Structure formats: structure tokens, C-alpha cells
């Protein structure tokens, strides 16, 4: 299988702010990915429980890959009952990528599994907090734009350190936005949503995950999820 790549990858220094999607001039700010940039995939667990994975359209070429789907299922089943804020949710997404992508034996299949895991976990969040889940999806897209799976391990570690600085900068900017509203005696939970930068710049062709062509399936149809494989953890 070919390695995953992102197109038009561009090196950016940690001093550059506002942070942008890699290879794009579009600035990044914390906020939900619009629904028109998402394609739902439907599946069900072994016990028959149905669930929906919201997959960004920029992931179109990977959404039927068995490794990705296996990660989706495992992530959904691994969710917890913790209450998240936009910051703690984005921190979780960043932490998962840091922990998993630093593994020296990470390959293309594992890369897809990890993406699926995060989206599956966010699908569970979406059952009660759909807007918050789409904040996590957009943040995942932002972070992944700097971490193509084609990077050799030593360069991937450097990219992860770079990602950490961009993540920190975006969280700092978002917290500042929240404080402008809480300083006006607005309840913090409401301030979280008022602080989203809208309208958000759409993701564009500068960030597209690619793998070899897979059979095309209609959008939004029942998608059977495979049994778990050796990526079980």
C-alpha cells in the first residue's frame, strides 16, 4: 500500500501566527467543521447498537479502508462519560496523535487506524454534544495537515513538536476569546460557543489525505464495520 501524503506541504515556523492549515494561507481558529464538509458513515456494533461516524470530506479516499473503519469502531466503544470543553476536547485529540504517532513502528495502516479511532471517539461525543464533536473533527484536520504519514520517524517527531506549538497557540487564542465574553458576565458555557470564529474558512484541496483508489460507495449508506484486528488495544 502506498504511503499517505498531504499535498502542497509547506514548512511553517513556530513564530508564524495566526496558525494556518499546512500548505494553505487559510488561518485556523477553534470552531466546528460545517456539516456541508462532512459525510456520515453508518455502522453498528456487534450488539446491534447503531452509530454514525462524521467523516470530513477531505478524508474521502480513506473512509472505506478496513484499518480506518476498525479504528472508528474501537474509538466509539472506548469513549467515556467525561464532560469536555472545547479546550479539553482539542487537548485530547492532540494527545492521542502525540502518543500514537511517536511509536517507532507506526505504518500507514496504523496511521489510518488512529484517525479512525479519534473520529469514532468523537462520534460518541456527538451523541450528546454534536457541535463540540465537530470542533474536535476540525482540530483533527488541522493537526493532521502537518503530520503526513510519509514522514520518516525522525522527521515525524519534529513535526509533532511543531504541531504541539501550533496547538498551544490556537488554544491560547481561543481562551483569550472566551475571556472577552466571561469578562462581560456571560456564563462560561455560553462563552465557549460565542468564542468560535465564524464564519470558518472551508477546508480546501491543499489538505487531502490520499490512498490508492478504493471501491466507491454511495454516501450516507449503511456501512458494515469489520471485526477488530491486530490493532486492538
Image: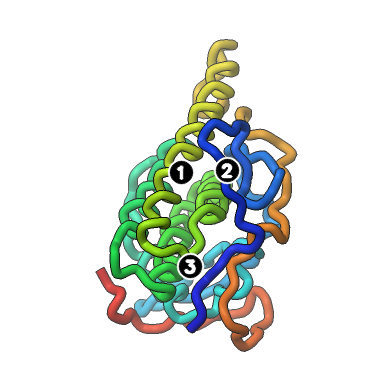
Residue 208, percent across and down? 63, 64
**Earlier residue among tags 2 and 3:** 2
Q: Residues within 10 Å of mark 3 (few under 14, many from 20)?
A: some
- Secondary structure found at label 3: loop
Q: Is residue 32 left or right of residue 167?
A: right
Any part of residue 161 in sight: yes
Q: Is residue 140 above or below residue 189?
A: below
Estimate the spatial distance between the alpha carbons at disc 2 and disc 1, rounded to whole Å.
9 Å
User: In this view of the protein, which residue sits in the foreground, 50 or 122?
Assistant: 122
Residue 105, percent across and down? 30, 69
Q: Which residue is mark 1?
A: 162
- Secondary structure found at label 1: helix
Q: Which residue is mark 3?
A: 150
Any part of residue 72 in sight: no
Identify the residue at image location x=56%, y=55%.
145
Q: Residues within 10 Å of mark 2 (few under 14, many from 20)?
A: some
Q: Are marks 2 and 1 in contact (CB under 8 Å)?
A: yes
Q: Place residue 12 in its image quadrant.
A: top right
Q: Place residue 190 in its image quadrant.
A: top right
Which numbered tag is attached to residue 12?
Answer: 2
Identify the residue at image location x=55%, y=27%.
173
Estimate the spatial distance between the alpha carbons at disc 2 and disc 3, rounded to whole Å.
18 Å
Residue 172, percent across and down? 49, 27
Amino acid at each position: 500500500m502506498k504511503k499517505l501524503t498531504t499535498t502542497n506541504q509547506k514548512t511553517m515556523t513556530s513564530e508564524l501566527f495566526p496558525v494556518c492549515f499546512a500548505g494553505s494561507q487559510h488561518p485556523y481558529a477553534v470552531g466546528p467543521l460545517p456539516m456541508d464538509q462532512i459525510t456520515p458513515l453508518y455502522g453498528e456494533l456487534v450488539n446491534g447498537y447503531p452509530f454514525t461516524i462524521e467523516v470530513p470530506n477531505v478524508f474521502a479516499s480513506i473512509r472505506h479502508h478496513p484499518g480506518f473503519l476498525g479504528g472508528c469502531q474501537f474509538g466509539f466503544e472506548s469513549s467515556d462519560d467525561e464532560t469536555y470543553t472545547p479546550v479539553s476536547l482539542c487537548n485530547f485529540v492532540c494527545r492521542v496523535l502525540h502518543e500514537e504517532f511517536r511509536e517507532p513502528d507506526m505504518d500507514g495502516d496504523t496511521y489510518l487506524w488512529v484517525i479512525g479511532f479519534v473520529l469514532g471517539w468523537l462520534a460518541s461525543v456527538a451523541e450528546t454534544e454534536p457541535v463540540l464533536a465537530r470542533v474536535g473533527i476540525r482540530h483533527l484536520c488541522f493537526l493532521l495537515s502537518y503530520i503526513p504519514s510519509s514522514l520518516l520517524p525522525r522527521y515525524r517527531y519534529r513535526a509533532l513538536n511543531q504541531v504541539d506549538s501550533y496547538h498551544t497557540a490556537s488554544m491560547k487564542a481561543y481562551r483569550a476569546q472566551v475571556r472577552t465574553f466571561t469578562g462581560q458576565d456571560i456564563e462560561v458555557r455560553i462563552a465557549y460557543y460565542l468564542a468560535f470564529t465564524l464564519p470558518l474558512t472551508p477546508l480546501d484541496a491543499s489538505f487531502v489525505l490520499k490512498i490508492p483508489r478504493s471501491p466507491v460507495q454511495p454516501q450516507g449508506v449503511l456501512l458494515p464495520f469489520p471485526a477488530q484486528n491486530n490493532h486492538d488495544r
